[in-house]
Amino acid sequence: MRARVVIRLARAVNATREFIEYPGVDFSNDLFATMKTHASFSHLQPPATFTLSGAERIRNPVRGAFLAGEVVLDGPSAKLFRITGTSLIALGVGLNVPFGILGATFHYPDILRQPTAAVLTQFHAGGVPLIATWYAFVAAALFLVPVALFVHDALATTSGQRASTIVRMATLAGIGAGVMQALGLIRWVFVVPVLARTFCDPTTSEPARAAAVGAFESLHQYAGVALGEHLGQLGTALWMVLIAGELTSRFAFARWLAWLGFASGGLITLGLVEGFATVIPFAVGVLGLATPVGYVGLSGWLVAIGVTFIRRAKASHR
């Protein structure tokens, strides 16, 4: 699957969107599916090499320079872009649906600052609907894994060769983030219900209740703080920052998308101090707002780049 270019202007645009002109230089179209959409080149049969006044040799429409800044995708590539864009939007929206329900029904995440006895009691009162909501949250977090793979394949397809080292690193970070966050959240589906039932059972002895509280706190510190929050958030921020940089610097996405990605990823990373505050006591202060604000930015960024992917797929049919 390779991208093709539609001729719009007899001059080229480089990766920094600066117009450059090299009159009389050969333009090679052997990477492109067709040039026939422009009347001047309707007689050409790829592969072909010809001289185009005002254009530089274009070996790759994304990594190098490309005419009029427009990359038009072939059928399979456009389909992958649509799937990638849709999955990004679904992730951006899907993360917020169970999170919002948990906030309304379980007072999450504020309830985690309450005594463990209050957490277990309220969880037990939530019953099956609360467990189902947590399961949906697990699924939403894990959905980052296929999304990272879709983005990887879309960018590799557009460049006409294997993905860059940065994209591959970002993909590993995204997969790791999805897995870590799912591992951290799944405790609310299969472990916490048992602990809450034990704690709230009137026949349970005090030592057993104390054991349930201790088990919850240990599990929360390891699966919640260490895996889900620290490693999961760190991987999410890394994936976000690396992909944001690549989309803007090499794939001509809008610059504001990069800055939104950088800012949101930075806030998510800054929010990791809350985890350290659980083992090294200090006042978090306003830094406690970094994570929620960062994830709001993440949601907006996911939807925005998803829309951009879909628009580029639609442009290929014009």
Image: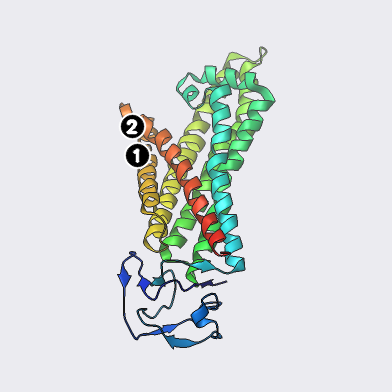
Res. 20 in view: yes
Q: Quadrant of residue 200?
A: top right
Which residue bears the numbered disc 2? 287
Q: Which residue is mark 1?
A: 270
Under mark 2, the amino acid is Leu
Label 1 sits on a secondary structure element that is: helix
- The tag on residue 301 is none
The relative height of residue 247 versus residue 196 in the rendered view (above or below) is: below
- Residue contact between numbered discs 1 and 2, judged by CB atoms under 8 Å: yes
Residue 262: where, in percent of width, then height? 36, 48
| Point 54% across, 36% down: residue | 96
Residue 190 shown left or right of residue 152 in the figure: right
What residue do we see at 67% from left, 13% from top?
203
Q: Earlier in the sequence, mark 1 or mark 2?
A: 1
- Tell me, what colour scheme is on the image? rainbow
Q: Name the residue nearer the viewer: 162 or 54.
A: 54
- In this view, which residue lies farthest toward the front? 39
**CA neighbours of label 1 inside 10 A, class few (<14), some (14 to 19), many (20+):** some
